[in-house]
Amino acid sequence: MTAGHSDSPDSAASPDSAAPLSGQERAVLALERRSWAGPGAKERAVREELGISPVRYYQLLNALLDDRRALEADPVTVNRLRRVRDARRGRR
């Protein structure tokens, strides 16, 4: 990251940035608010609606769970997902 370029699109990807969440980041959180009918439905939606692989989706989602901007934008979803993540880590 170069100094003095806080207005660049890349700065929005930084969890420490004051920039709002990107459209893709908001779409990831919106997808997580939905319920899913069966196996594969969520992965299909990720590919069709976001145009990314499920692996990339979960990478983005995990980064968002540690991003204060995501917590400010959608505290209910982020806190729920943090609890799920913490419970999974505790079982390992």
Image (cartoon, rainbow, N blue to C red):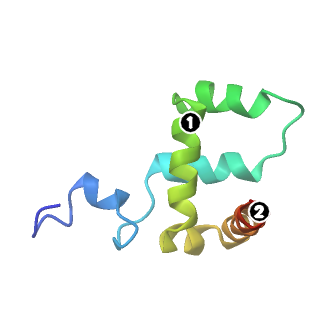
Q: Look at 10% across and 69% down and name the residue there.
A: 3
Left or right relative to 21: residue 35: right
Instruction: Name the amino acid, label 2.
Output: Val
**Front residue of 24 and 1:** 1
- Name the spot of residue 80 as percent of width and height, x first: 76, 67
- Name the spot of residue 67 as percent of width and height, x first: 49, 68
For label 2, the crowd category at 10 Å Cα-Cα, with few meaning under 14, some 14 to 19 and many 20 or more, is: few
Instruction: Name the amino acid, label 1.
Output: Val
Which secondary structure lies at badge 2? Answer: helix
Where, quadrant-wise, is the C terminus in this rendering?
Answer: bottom right
Q: CA distance from mark 1 to mark 2?
A: 18 Å
Task: Give the residue at mark 2.
Answer: 84
Q: Look at 71% across and 50% down and name the residue there.
A: 32
For label 1, the crowd category at 10 Å Cα-Cα, with few meaning under 14, some 14 to 19 and many 20 or more, is: few
Q: Look at 51% across and 30% down and name the residue there.
A: 52
Task: Give residue 20's quadrant in the image.
Answer: bottom left
Q: Is residue 58 above or below residue 46?
A: below
Outermost residue on the right side: it is 37
Q: Earlier in the sequence, mark 1 or mark 2?
A: 1
Outermost residue on the front side: it is 92
Task: Give the residue at mark 1.
Answer: 55
Left or right relative to 65: residue 76: right
